[in-house]
Amino acid sequence: GVHRGHQLVLASAMERAREMGGQAWVLTFDRHPLAMLSPAKCPPLLCTLEDRLHLLEGFGIDGVLVLEFTRQLAAQEPEAFVRWLCGKPHAEEGAGKGNAAKLSEIRCGQNWRFGRRAAGTPELLAQFGKVYGFRVVVVPYAEHLGLEISSTRIRYAVREGRLDDAAAMLGRPYSVRDAVIRGRGIGQTLNVATANVQPRTEVLPPNGVYAVRVTVEGGCHNGVANLGVHPTFSDVTPDHAVLETHLLGFEGDLYGKTIEVAFLGRLRDERVFESPDALARQIAEDVKAAARYF
């Protein structure tokens, strides 16, 4: 999720890199380890890999090492992993043959683990650092309401509709980012054209109507979005929730473009209306109610 705890690590790494005249890189996996080792136990992810890289780029990190998580990688002993990352220990290097892209420092959280059966701890990493020539700095936890911020807490907050808590832990409103798909054109007939997205993210707030902020092609627009299965028009019921967003004051075609929809606040439950006109009147009320979030 690149939440505030992760952001503390990123910020301190970038600050230190600038002091040293070096670069700050992030090390991450292409998937959650449990997706390979025990799929049934794998938690739902707050964002896709593509979204994660997009967020990291926005924070100004110099680069990202994306490792393919395999059973072979999972079986590596902690020191084998460090050796792969750093090259030979100092004692094995010939004079003047040091690594030009020398790893100088690793910053991580206290709960970070690496190597076979998660046997590698920050303390063990610091011991390896003395051999391989890097420092280890453990960055303190970020907290919300007196408790450590974690992806698990954020998942619960989003799914329970506690958007303020989720935003406080993420350092930004929770959002989904995906390509606009073609809908059935019903919004056009109601004079409230919508940009429709089939969210790929595994974590969504409860179905309902939300005040949102939409980012597309560098611009930001306020909007009102319905997350759900549009029950008023029951002739076609989608298998999964669809996010239908009306951008206030926007004119243009967004089909095929990638948009990011940030959830600012919940306005009401999704419900069935007796007619399209009744729905249109409610949408007008929703737009008024959303104004307090903009």
Image (cartoon, rainbow, N blue to C red):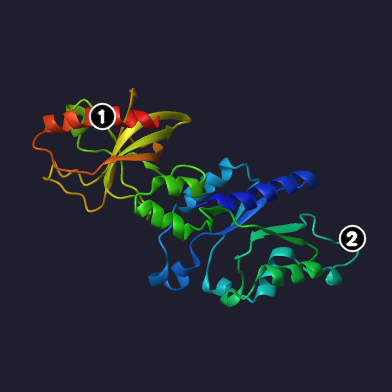
Using the image, determine if residue 132 lies above or below residue 116.
Answer: above
Q: How many marks?
A: 2
Three-letter code, disc 1 = Ala
Three-letter code, disc 2 = Gly
Task: Please give the name of the residue rendered at 44% of the width and 49% of the height, measured from the top-left corner.
Answer: 166
Tell whether label 1 touches label 2 (CB within 8 Å).
Answer: no
Q: Quadrant of the C terminus?
A: top left
- Judging depth in this view, the residue of 276 and 133 nearest the camera is 276
Q: Position of residue 215 (x, y in %)?
A: 43, 34
Query: Is residue 21 something that shows in the picture?
Result: no
* Mark 2 / mark 1, whichever is N-terminal: 2
Using the image, determine if residue 38 lies above or below residue 221.
Answer: below
Name the side, left or right, on which 32 lies relative to 135. left
Disc 2 designates what residue? 96
Query: Is residue 133 something that shows in the picture?
Result: yes
Disc 1 designates what residue? 193
Q: Which quadrant holds residue 44?
A: bottom left
Task: Please give the name of the residue rendered at 30% of the width and 50% of the height, measured from the top-left corner.
Answer: 206
Q: Position of residue 8 (x, y in %)?
A: 62, 50
Name the side, left or right, on which 30 lies relative to 260. right
